[in-house]
Image (tube, grey):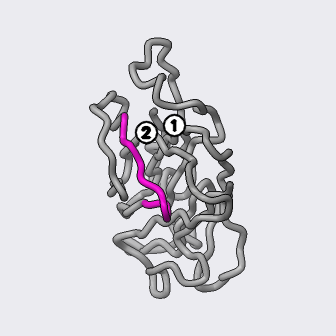
């Protein structure tokens, strides 16, 4: 799992970035998951509501975006990303921190995650309840969809935020895992 971004001024912070996945035909973890496609990419990003060249001093992000969507104190009803899963399936999620600055503590309510890749390198499987992911980092984890059908919060708590940007009130810094 890799990503790209601009190196001209602050275009990267303003959104010129994306994900690239190179599928390994000899993936040593392939037996541990059923689904690995575009639907299993999760991006975390900081959103500055003023373009970086206009913001002056180093600004704090106004919002956290998960797969390009997110709420903030000025719009607590904005759409949230929804990631759909099917009960009984095992998913390889590719988590990518595209943020310019903050790191995030990432978790999915009611689910553990088995980390199998870090920054493009396969790892020994490690079961965790949360992942701290810094700017530019990538992790792949396997999630087993073994909970009761419903909606579960996906949470990405940033370590840096603008006023009103901390916590999870009204779904900020969040997305939804839906069975």
Specify whether 119 is left or right of 94: left
Q: Quadrant of the C terminus?
A: bottom right
Q: Which of 116/17 is in front?
A: 116
Residue in the picture at 60% in, 33% down? 35
Mark 1, Cα crowd under 10 Å, few <14 / some 14-19 / many 20+, is many
Residue in the picture at 41% in, 48% down? 113
Specify whether 154 is left or right of 120: right
Residue 64: mark in rendering:
none
Alpha-carbon span between mark 2 and mark 1: 6 Å
Circles 2 and 1: CB atoms closer than 8 Å: yes
Whichever of callouts 2 and 1 sits on the residue coming sooner in the sequence is 1
Residue 126 % position (x, y): 30, 42
Residue in the picture at 53% in, 50% down? 43
Could you say whether the residue bearing mark 1 is in a helix, strand or loop? strand
Residue behind mark 2: 140
Looking at the image, is 110 positioned above or below residue 87? below
Could you say whether the residue bearing mark 2 is in a helix, strand or loop? strand
Residue 31 % position (x, y): 47, 23
Residue 92: mark in rendering:
1
Looking at the image, is 3 positioned above or below residue 133? above
User: Residue 122 magenta-drawn?
Assistant: no
Looking at the image, is 14 positioned above or below residue 32? below
Secondary structure character of the magenta stretch overall: strand
Q: Quadrant of the N terminus?
A: top left
Q: Which residues are magenta?
A: 107-116
Looking at the image, is 94 positioned above or below residue 112? above
Q: Which of 91/46 is in front?
A: 91
């Amino acid at each position: 799992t890799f990503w790209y971004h601009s190196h001209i001024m602050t275009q990267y912070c303003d959104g010129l970035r994306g994900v690239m996945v190179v599928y390994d035909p000899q993936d040593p973890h392939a037996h541990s998951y059923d689904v690995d496609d575009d639907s299993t990419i999760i991006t975390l990003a900081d959103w500055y509501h003023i373009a970086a060249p206009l913001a002056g001093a180093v600004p704090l992000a106004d919002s956290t975006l998960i797969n390009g969507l997110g709420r903030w104190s000025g719009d607590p009803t904005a759409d949230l990303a929804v990631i759909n899963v099917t009960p009984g399936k095992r998913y390889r999620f590719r988590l990518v921190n595209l943020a310019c600055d903050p790191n995030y503590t990432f978790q999915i309510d009611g689910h553990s995650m088995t980390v199998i890749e870090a920054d493009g390198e396969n790892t020994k499987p490690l079961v965790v309840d949360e992942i701290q992911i810094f700017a530019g980092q990538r992790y792949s984890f396997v999630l087993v969809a073994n909970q009761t059908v419903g909606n579960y919060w996906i949470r990405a708590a940033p370590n840096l935020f603008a006023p009103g940007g901390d916590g999870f009130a009204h779904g900020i810094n969040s997305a939804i895992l839906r069975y």
